[in-house]
Image (tube, rainbow, N blue to C red):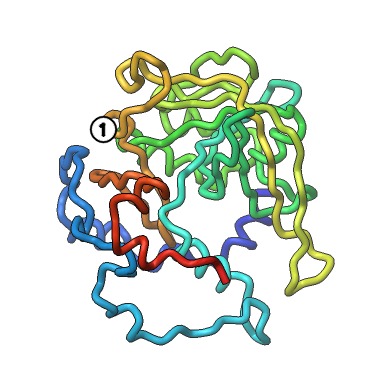
Amino acid sequence: MADARTDEEKPVERNRHPDFNTVQASRPDWSSNEWHYTKTKDPTWKWGQGANDGGESLKKNHIEIDPYEEGRPPAANYKLLISGIIPRPIGFISTVSKDGTSMNLAPMSYTQVVNHDPPVFCIGFSSSLENAKDSLRNLCESKECTINIISEHFVEAANATSINAPYGVSEWALTGLHPAPTNTVKAPRVAESIFSIEGKLLETREFESRARPGVKTGVLAIVEGTHFWVREDAINEEKSQIDPAVLKPISRLGGITFCRNTEGFEIPRPDYKKTMESSEEARNLAEPKA
């Protein structure tokens, strides 16, 4: 199974560097930037102003792309989407086989929270159910998983779990990460992870290729969160907010590029009634939707 998946990965060619170690050695060392807030790009923005670039973005033309145009390989759409839908949160998924004999741990950048009551998450897998990757296979069999958030202090180990090891080989042992007990599922959480979510599978949906009719190419798993774990120094007293300065989450960009979150800015959500009362510009601009 591992060999078949390796063949499927060849057209993707994520790593564009023939000698990555040499490239890495030429780059600056990891910086110790601490989380901090900045102003917005244009704190003086006014209603009706539009973009904050003075109209520069409107001077550029756009290129149309038909995802199914003749000769366009599916890998081109994959590269386009993962380089344009960024940054993406990474679900570090822990699963256990139905018989409990095999544990798997893998990073999934097609992961997102989609509801809070109940807590619901979606996880995308780039494989069919028939040729399921280890995490999907375990999830479908056991109906359980644990979603862990990756932070700066174990990013190398987390990435190492993406190795195409045969089914049954433990990523935990290969990387040195530590399994920790859970409450409502059998899949362990990652002890190094600051935030973990226990979850149970609600349903899956399989997708068929448009370019190759009849070929199944992906699976969407919908998971309900059943229990949370947050490291004690990262959560507030109300147990309702996680400190980004402690979480230091890692996200995915395109190819083999990851992203740190070292700064943020705040923008209050406007209230229509108050805005109409206080801003003449907004009152003059307000009109019915076409």
Please name the residue shown 63% across and 49% down the image. Answer: 124
**Residue 11 in sight:** no
Q: Amino acid at mark 1?
A: Ala
**Residue 59 found in image quarter:** bottom left
* Number of residue marks: 1
Left or right: 83, with 265 as reference point = right
Please name the residue shown 43% across and 57% down the image. Answer: 86
Q: Position of residue 169 (x, y in %)?
A: 59, 34
Left or right: 56, with 69 as reference point = left
* Residue that badge 1 annotates: 245
Q: Which of these two is toward me, 90 or 175?
A: 90
Please name the residue shown 42% across and 22% down the image. Answer: 240
**Residue 93 found in image quarter:** top right
Q: Position of residue 61 (x, y in %)?
A: 41, 87
Q: Position of residue 147 (x, y in %)?
A: 54, 32
Q: Position of residue 284 (x, y in %)?
A: 36, 67
Q: Secondary structure at mark 1?
A: helix
Please name the residue shown 49% across and 40% down the image. Answer: 161
Q: Which of these two is toward me, 68 or 53?
A: 53
**Residue 287 in sight:** yes
Mark 1 surroundings within 10 Å by alpha-carbon count, few (fewer than 14), some (14 through 19), many (20 or more) = some
Above or below 222: residue 144: above
Left or right: 246, with 230 as reference point = left
